[in-house]
Image (spheres, rainbow, N blue to C red):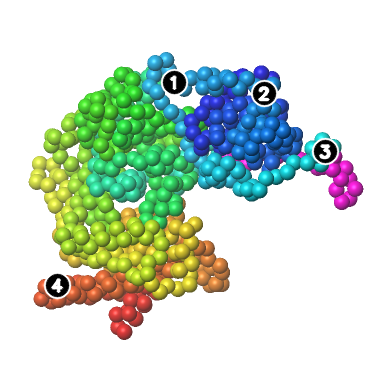
């Protein structure tokens, strides 16, 4: 068969970066391509990777013995004959010489294809969505090979090649097993069948309900990025409605839309993480909230075409494309005139984005734009109107007083709604909801020092307990038609606690296991005072509050926060089943970790909270309402959920000792 079209396709698959080597599995496993043609194409393409030959050899050694015996050993022999070093062979000189009669290596692979989407369009890269590893070792192993120039099993000692090896290579392929039968079993090997990207996303959407959790997931991403403020806008402006094949990016800037701004900028890891599916760059970061879920993907409830602008780059995500074309990245400086016009029609004067930003080629912060889905698609049958977005806002408002209590960096959230492209940065549109958290200077200083120490530990064990007490003042200002904005204030006493020193064997094992990335970091908060109409009830947080249910999840009068092991959709803690409890069956690490937080770490934080409240009450003259507040912070055993009873018992033992 003529390999030229195949070569072109392969170069497009592999040209982007080192991570694209995972496509090797697909290419080598094609059954309808002769081995010789496979080798010609693969050697040609992999010449451009420093460890490409090594990678191919390792694959064939494990999965294609014929190719390994007949090609790589002979290539090594050829390399030795030419008195080339082992490093020389690893870089491919022996392979190149062996196949020089097959392929014209002077051909530049980059000349065989064009990455432009249309004539004269923006310079753009199209990195693949990043899937979990599917074959061979992890990419960390690839990096190791690339740096060392040798296989993981290879020693520094030279390996002698003998005539005996050559004879073995040329011997018959017929083998005899212990029963005397000749040959091997006829076996056809194939890979596991994976769902399409669309189906993967639909599965994720089925786990993330279409509710106010979507906004919390976006806030969580901002918190993990170190943002201090978030602004969210529903824009009712109709724009870029007429779509055309000549302007393939116009659909990403269609309006009405949902816009989210935060004042942090994407790092290289963020750009990588946003392209990951069913995994996260935060998985091994013990103090990142987002490591627990797949939250950003929940925006596909709202849109089919997310757009992200941060720093000097723009990312467009199109899940309807083939998997190697889903992500389109371009520099702001390279945007074509028509694309700039479409972008500005939707986003001009929105949270600091303007034609001046495009001229300066840099946006300070991060801007997400989600065109509302107005017709059902293959991805989702759910259509989104402005009213449905307002329902998300209303759902968020019910939890607004809780959102900022335990967060490390985020202190301000504003919600806007506008029918036009009115300038939002010049006070011409007021937010209809503002949530802010303030602290006195002493509390701010204690929090900053505590967070700094926790970050330095990076999830590791501390020689002693770390704690921070602070008083947090949360204000919620809501605009009302033809009335003055109404402000509700809620004051909190908060204790943050990081377990160190003595631990149970189970806790020490789980906290020390770097593959689990569990962190012994918890917090407890009690409401000090509040405006009329506020109702207090204890709730569970993993920095962000878990979704509310009809009754308190704990039965405690205080909020409890911890780096709990959660379900993938961040809605539930992982607990042991009734069967596991009754029969004392084995519990996985996630369940054991949650039990350690509740039984061993949270009691210490709760006790510190009670002591702080007593001291605060004493400092203010033991006023009647403050004394009542101290007693209110003690749990009523009759109301506490069974899973949290051990926490209350430990607290009472400690306080009454």
Residue under label 3, please give it: 167
Going by the image, does 68 lie left or right of 163?
left
Disc on the earlier residue, 2 or 3: 2
Disc on the earlier residue, 2 or 1: 2
Q: Secondary structure at mark 2?
A: loop
Look at the image and give the residue range highlighted in magenta. Answer: 174-194
Looking at this view, name the residue that lies furthest to the right. Answer: 180
Question: Mark 2 or mark 1: which is in front?
Answer: 2
Residue under label 4, please give it: 625
Disc on the earlier residue, 1 or 3: 1
Residue under label 2, please give it: 100
Position in image of residue 597 (x %, y %): 40, 67
Residue at the image position 46 percent from the left and 44 percent from the top: 204
Looking at this view, name the residue that lies furthest to the front. Answer: 83
Residue under label 1, please give it: 116
Closer to us: 657 or 143? 143
Going by the image, does 435 lie left or right of 97?
left
Please tell me whether residue 183 belongs to the stretch shown in magenta: yes
- Find the distance from the CA under tag 1 to the CA under tag 4: 70 Å
Disc on the earlier residue, 3 or 4: 3
> Is the residue marked by circle 1 packed among few (<14), some (14-19), or many (20+) residues within 10 Å?
few
From this viewpoint, is residue 275 visible? yes
- Find the distance from the CA under tag 3 to the CA under tag 4: 94 Å
């Amino acid at each position: 068969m003529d390999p030229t079209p195949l070569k072109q396709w392969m170069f497009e698959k592999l040209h982007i970066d080192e991570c694209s080597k995972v496509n090797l599995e697909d290419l080598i496993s094609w059954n309808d391509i002769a081995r010789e043609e496979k080798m010609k194409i693969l050697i040609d393409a992999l010449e451009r990777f420093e460890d490409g030959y090594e990678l191919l050899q390792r694959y064939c050694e494990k999965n294609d013995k014929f190719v390994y015996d007949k090609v790589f050993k002979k290539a090594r022999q050829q390399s030795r004959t030419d008195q080339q070093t082992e490093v020389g062979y690893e870089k491919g000189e022996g392979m190149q010489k062996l196949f020089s009669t097959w392929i014209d290596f002077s051909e530049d692979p980059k000349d065989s294809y064009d990455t432009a989407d249309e004539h004269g369009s923006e310079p753009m890269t199209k990195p693949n969505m990043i899937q979990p590893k599917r074959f061979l070792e992890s990419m960390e192993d690839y990096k190791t090979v690339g740096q060392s120039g040798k296989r993981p099993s290879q020693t520094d000692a030279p390996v002698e090649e003998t005539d005996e090896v050559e004879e073995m290579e040329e011997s018959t392929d017929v083998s005899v097993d212990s029963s005397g039968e000749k040959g091997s079993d006829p076996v056809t090997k194939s890979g596991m069948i994976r769902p399409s990207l669309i189906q993967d996303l639909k599965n994720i959407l089925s786990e993330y309900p279409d509710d106010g959790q979507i906004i919390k997931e976006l806030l969580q991403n901002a918190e993990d990025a170190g943002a201090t403020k978030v602004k969210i806008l529903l824009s009712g402006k109709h724009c870029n409605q007429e779509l055309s094949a000549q302007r393939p990016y116009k659909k990403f800037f269609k309006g009405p839309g949902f816009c989210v701004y935060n004042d942090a900028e994407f790092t290289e890891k963020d750009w990588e993480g946003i392209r990951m599916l069913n995994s996260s760059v935060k998985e091994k970061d013990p103090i990142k909230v987002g490591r627990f879920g797949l939250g950003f993907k929940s925006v596909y409830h709202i849109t089919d075409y997310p757009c992200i602008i941060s720093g000097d780059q723009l990312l467009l995500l199109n899940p309807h494309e083939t998997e190697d074309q889903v992500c389109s990245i371009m520099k702001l400086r390279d945007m074509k005139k028509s694309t700039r016009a479409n972008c500005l029609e939707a986003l001009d004067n929105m949270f600091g984005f303007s034609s001046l930003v495009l001229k300066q080629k840099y946006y300070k912060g991060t801007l997400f734009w989600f065109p509302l889905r107005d017709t059902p698609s293959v991805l989702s049958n759910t259509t989104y109107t402005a009213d449905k977005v307002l329902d998300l806002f209303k759902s968020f408002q019910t939890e607004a007083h809780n959102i900022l209590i335990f967060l490390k960096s985020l202190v301000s959230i504003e919600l806007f709604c506008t029918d036009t492209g009115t300038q939002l940065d010049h006070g011409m549109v007021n937010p209809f909801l503002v949530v802010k958290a303030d602290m006195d200077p002493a509390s701010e200083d204690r929090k900053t020092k505590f967070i700094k120490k926790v970050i330095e530990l990076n999830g590791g064990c501390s020689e002693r307990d770390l704690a921070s007490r602070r008083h947090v003042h949360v204000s919620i200002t809501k605009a009302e038609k033809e009335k003055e904005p109404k402000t509700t204030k809620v004051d909190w006493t908060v204790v943050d606690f990081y377990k160190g020193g003595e631990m149970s064997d189970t806790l020490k094992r789980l906290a020390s296991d770097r593959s689990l990335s569990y962190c012994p970091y918890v917090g407890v908060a009690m409401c000090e005072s509040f405006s009329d109409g506020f109702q207090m009830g204890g709730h569970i947080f993993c920095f962000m509050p878990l979704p509310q249910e009809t009754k308190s999840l704990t039965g405690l009068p205080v909020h409890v926060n911890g780096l709990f092991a959660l379900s993938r959709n961040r809605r539930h803690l992982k607990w042991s089943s009734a069967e596991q409890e009754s029969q004392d069956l084995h519990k996985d690490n996630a369940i054991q970790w949650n039990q350690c937080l509740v039984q061993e770490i949270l009691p210490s934080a709760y006790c510190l909270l009670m002591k702080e409240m007593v001291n605060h009450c004493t400092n203010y003259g033991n006023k009647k309402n403050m004394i009542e507040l101290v007693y209110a912070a003690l749990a009523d055993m009759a109301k506490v959920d069974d899973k949290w009873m051990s926490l209350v018992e430990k607290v009472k033992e400690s306080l009454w000792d």
